[in-house]
Image (cartoon, rainbow, N blue to C red):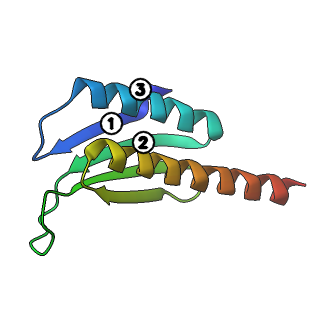
């Protein structure tokens, strides 16, 4: 199940604590949908010259039967960006699964 998950760090050092959090959250996403084929989490720090301070971006890409889902979230804390991105993806997966159930009935 989690073997199809990929975590990519761009211009950042890998964090074991963040990897553990991401893997737990990915496992939770797999429980919401059995249609997930592949998942990828990309963590980076986009260049934003107008913003003071450092911004982090967490992007989650999920390939599913049907259409892929993509969520991206920016924050000054990497952990908060990851948390918010997973919460948004969880909401999208729940909406999609409820739509599928309505179509079947």
Mark pair 2, 1: CA separation = 6 Å
Compared across the picture, whether 81 is left or right of 86 comes to: left
Question: What's the residue at 85%, 54% (across, down)?
Answer: 104
Q: Which mark is residue 91?
A: none
Q: Which residue is mark 2?
A: 39
Element type at marker 1?
strand
Element type at marker 2?
strand
Query: Could you tell me residue 58's position as x and y percent?
Result: 31, 51
Q: Which residue is mark 3?
A: 3
- Please report contact status of discs 3 and 2: CB closer than 8 Å, yes or no: no
Query: Could you tell me residue 8's position as x and y percent?
Result: 23, 41
Q: Is residue 34 visible?
A: no
Compared across the picture, whether 54 is left or right of 6 comes to: left
Question: What's the residue at 42%, 44% (across, down)?
Answer: 83
Question: What's the residue at 25%, 47% (across, down)?
Answer: 43
Residue 37 higher or lower than 73, as above or below: above
Looking at the image, which is closer to me, 4 or 18? 18
Quarter occupied by residue 103 = bottom right
- First in sequence, mark 2 or 1: give its number: 1
Element type at marker 3?
helix
| Residue farthest to the right, as pictured | 105
Quarter occupied by residue 5 = top left
Q: Which residue is mark 1?
A: 6
Q: Is residue 70 visible?
A: yes
Mark pair 3, 2: CA separation = 9 Å
- First in sequence, mark 3 or 2: give its number: 3
| Residue farthest to the front, as pictured | 52
Mark pair 3, 1: CA separation = 8 Å
Query: Could you tell me residue 57's position as x and y percent?
Result: 27, 55
- Please report contact status of discs 2 and 1: CB closer than 8 Å, yes or no: yes
């Amino acid at each position: 199940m989690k073997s199809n998950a990929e975590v990519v760090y761009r211009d950042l050092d890998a964090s074991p604590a963040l990897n553990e959090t991401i893997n737990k959250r990915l496992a939770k996403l797999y429980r919401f949908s059995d249609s997930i084929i592949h998942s990828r989490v990309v963590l980076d720090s986009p260049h934003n010259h107008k913003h003071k301070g450092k911004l982090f971006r967490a992007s989650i890409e999920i390939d599913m039967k049907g259409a892929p889902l993509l969520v991206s979230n920016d924050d000054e804390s990497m952990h908060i960006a990851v948390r918010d991105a997973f919460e948004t993806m969880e909401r999208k997966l729940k909406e999609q699964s409820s739509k599928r159930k309505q179509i079947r009935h």
